[in-house]
Amino acid sequence: MNDNVNFEKIIKAEKRKKLFKAIAVSGAATVIIGGSVFYAIHNQLGIQMAKQASKQQRQFNIDDLISSPNIISTSQYFSTTKTTQGTLKSDREKNIDGYRVAYPEKNVTFNTHGIESASAQTPNIYNKNPATKEIIATNRQSQQKEPLFFNVKYEHAYQSEKDKKELLAPSIPTHEAKTLSQLPNALGEVAITFDKRYSYDDIRQMMPENVMINYYWLGIHSDKLDTMSVAGSYTGLNASDDGTGKLTEGAEVKAGKNDFSGYQGLKSALKQQSGQRTVNNVDIAKDGQRQVSKNLKTAKFAGVIVTGRTQNLARLDSQKYTFATNVGVTTPIMPYQAPIK
């Protein structure tokens, strides 16, 4: 009898041991599988975020080249706010005849699917004089004055149209450069809209020696876009920052690559940006493609941004090639730093 009882106890003890082992093995397997799944998901999210980060950085680089009139990016940096959320920021400045003037940063917040939010890039535009309908533009963040270009083609199309009821009246071309004579001992930035498109070589010969060419504006091919519509959507190239006003030829950039530079880089970027931005049913990138040439030697531009001493900039309104001038940033000349020009 006692032997049977002991035998039953032994069997029950063995069953409990096996049960505990099964539970332990099952728990360990669950931990391993769960950890593997977590690692796989986390790794996949990391890959997706890295792809989005690369995509946003590439877009920043394109914008820096073709959509930043006298706006220079000095640094780019990422910050991760969540596992599935990151922010790319770019510190920026303007070159005002050798003086570095702070400009609002550009930023974009993104997740694994794309952009969540981005800093505004279009300026505030309003009438500075209701009587004359002259407009003025300011930066939304800093309230700095923004230089404006004018679409000469829209002006001509409006004047030749018999039924003007359906058209927006063109903005009155401003001639603000001459007002800078009232601002002594200062440097300024002026956007010059030409009366027609001029070649790269002609522009460098046309500009006075005492002003610095900072930016070449490609212009607008369409006659459907008025001046206010395209503000903040300018396409062009920044010149070298040494005061020579030079552009580089650059090289064609293949799809997926990230090294955009020079005139050929501009052409490649425009091809790859088709469909990215439309204003009044006009694809800005395709509009730009209609105006590019084979190379820099044959390239033509519709305007420039120049910087320099205000007394020198004030004379630009009297030039025969000037259709309009519009002032941007101004800054005082300091005794401890000489301007380039």
Image (tube, rainbow, N blue to C red):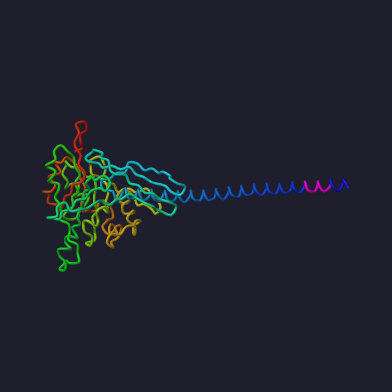
Which quadrant is the C terminus positioned in? Answer: top left
Task: Specify the principal SS of the magenta part.
Answer: helix
Residue situated furthest right in the rendering? 1
Horizontal side of residue 11 vs 237, given as left or right: right
Q: Nearer the viewer, residue 121 or 261?
A: 121
Which residue is nearer to you in this view: 137 or 66? Answer: 137
Q: Position of residue 127 (x, y in %)?
A: 17, 53
Q: Is residue 298 visible?
A: no
Q: Is residue 124 visible to us here?
A: yes
Name the one closer to the observer, 97 or 139: 139
Q: Position of residue 60 (x, y in %)?
A: 35, 49
Q: Which residues are magenta?
A: 7-13
On the picture, is 164 further left or further right than 66? left
Rendered location of residue 9, percent (x, y): 81, 46
- Considering every residue shown, the one lying at the far top of the view is 336
Looking at the image, residue 221 lies above or below residue 141: below
**Residue in the picture at 65% in, 48% down:** 27
Q: Quadrant of residue 287?
A: bottom left
**80 drawn magenta:** no
